[in-house]
Amino acid sequence: MNTHNKKRFIIILLLMLFYHGFSQQKIKDEIKIDGIMTPNEWKGAKIFDLKYEVEPGDNTNAPFKTTAFVLYSETKLYIAFDAKISDITLLRATIKERDTAWDDDWVSIAIDTYDDNRNLIIVGSNAYGSQIDFKLDSGEDNGDPGFDLNYDSSGSINNEGYIVEMAIPFSEFQYKKKDILNWKIGFYREAWLKSKIGISSSKFVKGDNCLSCQFDTYIELKGINPKKRLDFLPFISGNYAGDLEGDKLKFNKPSIKVGLNTRYDLSSSTSLDVTINPDFSQVESDVTKIDVNSQFAINYQEKRPFFNEGKDILSSLGNLVYSRSINNPIFASKIVNQGEKSRIYFLTSYDMDTPYLVPGEDRSYMGKAEESFGNILRYQRIYPNGSNIGLLTTNRFYKGGGMGNLIAGDANIRLNKTYQVNFDFAHSMTEEPNNDWISTDDMVNGKSISLNGEKFSGNKIGIELNRSTKNWRSELLLDQYSPLFRTDMGFVTNNNFKQISFNQTYVSERDKKVTKYVARVRYKFKYSYNGKLKQTNIMPLYSMQFKNGFQFTYGYAIIPFEEYKGKEFNNYGLNFINLKYSPSEKINIFSRLLIGTDIAYNIDDPVIGKRSTMTLEFNYQPINKFNIGLMLSTESMKYKVTNEEIYKGHIFRTDSNYQFNRDFSLKLVTEYNDFSESLFIQSLLKWNPNPSTIFYLGGNNDMKNNINSNENWVSNSAQLFFKLQYLFSSKN
């Protein structure tokens, strides 16, 4: 044993002696978060062992030792992990920006501050201190990675594994203030042998859809006294943009925008956010989704920080609320209360550029509105077993006339570990603007889709029954949307239908060459609101996960009947194959192939054609700080008889990222879109030391293939931009 390892062994031995000799106690804020555990710092910590392999194992003994340590002060919760590994060459660790280290080895603490299973806040880190945090609601599988806490973390790698230290301010949590708090906690680690495994401090019952209900450990916190947050987040942004005029780019004058976001903790359970003249533009480009054969508008994930706190209160409402419908507000405010038995979300905004969406039976219609004033009010009553009931009201008033109001109620009732019932009802009241935002002659239920000031109302009802056991999952869903149901603050794209669907799934997990089998069949019957059959759909699916990290999925969508725009189609179907493989931390491969027959929806005379779709994603990390991602998506359709093309195209995208450290990165994105014959290039320098403070400096160039020009490619538009947003935190 070399000198370095001897010292480390002695330190860990002393730590273990101290840990078992002292009970948990409150300390001063003297722990240095540097990824190095010293006996004096962590003396008296409460110890938790992560004993159980829960994925793919079924509460079997963990293959290596992971120990968590907990201390607290008046203002912060301190957590450390000593994460061993049987073979250090199996450790997956890279320097990543926040919430991107999911394929690494990482450790985390899960916290339920109310002990009522409403949600779990998961806070973690990989071996380099790259942060991972998300919020998981009762009954959810994946949670919301957009949820962010402002905490410190650091990690260090040794010959036996790695050490992680974290400090989380109590002011980052919402809870009921008491002299003595009892918070339910658990600890979880994802690691790699030949494939990914999950290790926990508590046993998990497979099939139980309430993860937080299964944690059985608590920490007692006495006399914590965090100061109320009063955060100021001023920003300044600027851009220098130009558009093609003739054969040259013409640039506008440089523009500067300034604004202010503030956050104040009214209490330990209630926060107030106010933003004036915010910059809600999304700097980092979304991956373009192919919509050449899509009947309905496509939505994108919410990534803007202002909307993330409290998003879990809205999560059970589906598309009744869509925060990205608030596009360019000049003012917005939000109150979030996480009470002991209930929670409230209230948002109000004045938007300068409002998207206007009209759902339909066979397609949706999008337009661009002008100024609008909108509100979202949500109340939810919480019950200890993970159940809840709630109410929602939203409204939007448009400048010049017109409004959309919605009232809704929902219930998510967890009957026991096996059964859960979900119910929701919504009623919309619409007075259309009298405007030209949408131009069409289409009609629905005697009303025009174009906006001419008509008044009408609609409703939506949904009932869902879930049964979940160790090996079986069953889901029965009944849904109906009336012809005139709309959600001005939501993203409902399809109405005028009734639908019943049934999913039956068999899952088998084991510690063998094939670690997981999944077999599923789905039946769906869709009718128009007046009872006319619209579609029947049967889809069997089979999936396998192997111990070497390879995953394979095959499914076949069988459509015996579909009616679209008055035309009937019979007996077509699509095969799809998904492949995923991650042989090491350096390589990740994903492929999806969809081939068969489908309806060509977006042509004048829809027909069944031969469809082929392929997606290939390849991520390669040659060194610890550099990553390159390649993505190719192709989509084509041909007439069945003549084999002539109906449409054909592809999107090719590259994402290159150099991570100087956890907070500072340089990115280059290129995306070629064959459908629009355009090439998008973005370079971006980014500094992001915490969820609120951020600095961007970059440029975009949107080019098009111009056959009339002497040059094949000309810039259609170009932009240089910067943004600086800095958190000033004051304590009252």
Image: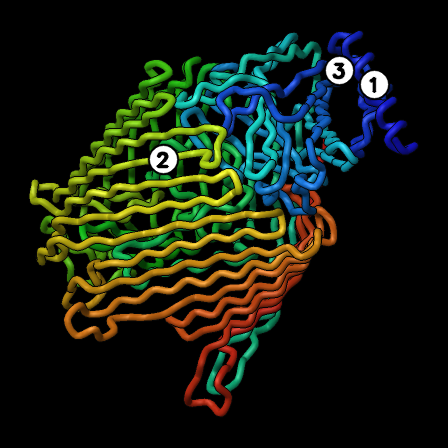
User: Residue 573's spot in the image, x, y percent?
Assistant: 21, 53
User: Residue 370's spot in the image, x, y percent?
Assistant: 38, 57
Asked if residue 606 lies left or right of residue 95, the reply is left
Asked if residue 452 lies left or right of residue 677, the reply is left
Q: Nearer the viewer, residue 280 or 478?
A: 478
Query: Label 1 vs label 2: CA separation?
Result: 44 Å
Q: Give the secondary structure at mark 2.
A: strand
- Of the residues shown, which amino acid type is indicated by label 3? Ala
Is residue 676 shown above or below 564? below
Asked if residue 481 lies left or right of residue 665, the reply is left
**What residue is disc 2 on?**
518
Q: Residue at x 69, y 22 (%)?
A: 67
Query: Label 3 vs label 2: CA separation?
Result: 42 Å
**What residue is disc 3 on?**
45
Which quadrant of the structure image shows residue 497?
Answer: top left
Examine the rendering and report whether any part of residue 177 can be seen.
yes
Q: Which mark is residue 13?
A: 1
- Of the residues shown, which amino acid type is indicated by label 1? Leu
Q: Nearer the viewer, residue 193 or 696?
A: 193
- Of the residues shown, which amino acid type is indicated by label 2? Val
